[in-house]
Image (cartoon, grey):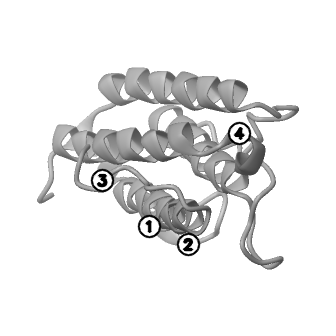
Amino acid sequence: MFLTKDDFFEMLEGNRRLTMRIVEVFPEDKLFSYSPDEKLRPFAEMIKEIVNIENGYMSGVALDVWEYKDVFEGVSTKIELIKICHDVRDNTRKQWHEMSQERLEIVMKDSFFGEVQSHFARLQYGLENEIHHRGQGYTYLRILGIDPPAFYER
């Protein structure tokens, strides 16, 4: 493995800090309702997807408990959304530190999407999904006339 488990986690953490900075500057009245086109989702829905994937994958990778569920059921405020994001990440940190590097190398069929891949590749997909949706958040903010945080500040 080119990256160690800890190196990869630092990459995950830096990206999450940046994603949460986007959430924090997003106006609450737009976070749950605004999209620039009817084919696109509000940014809060993208954040829910990012964190639900994280929650499901980490339980699966770390504990072999594969369950994709919506941890945001009933959430309608920015404060609630941010709290759940932090709660899930705190749980991820705990599971990550208890998990061996070898767990990331296990190859199996993905319980959610069906592909055969390593746990590392699975988590990399989660990271790429986060980066993709964060980019949409940047675009939404700019359309709303709001300067987003600098992407290089992690």
> Which amino acid type corresponds to the residue marked 3 in the rendered image?
Ala
Q: Is residue 135 above or below residue 17?
A: below
- The tally of labels here is 4
Q: Nearer the viewer, mark 2 or mark 4?
A: 4
Q: CA distance from mark 2 to mark 1?
A: 6 Å
Residue type of the residue flagged with mark 2: Glu
Real-space CA distance between mark 1 and mark 4, rounded to the nearest whole angstrom: 38 Å
> If you read the primary sequence from the N terminus, does the residue marked by circle 4 or circle 3 appear first?
4
Eyeballing the image, is 61 above or below 145? above
Residue under the image location 73 percent in, 50 percent down: 30
CB contact under 8 Å: marks 2 and 3: no
Mark 3 closeness class: few <14, some 14–19, many ≥20 residues within 10 Å = few
Query: Which residue occupies the foreground of this view, 139 or 98?
Result: 139
Q: Earlier in the sequence, mark 1 or mark 3?
A: 1
Q: Which residue is mark 2?
A: 115
Q: Position of residue 137 (x, y in %)?
A: 55, 60
Residue sitting farthest toward the left: 2
State the image coordinates of residue 31 (x, y, percent, origin top left).
70, 48
- What's the amino acid at mark 4? Glu
What mark, if any, has residue 150 been given in the picture? 3
At which x and y percent is residue 129?
Answer: 50, 63
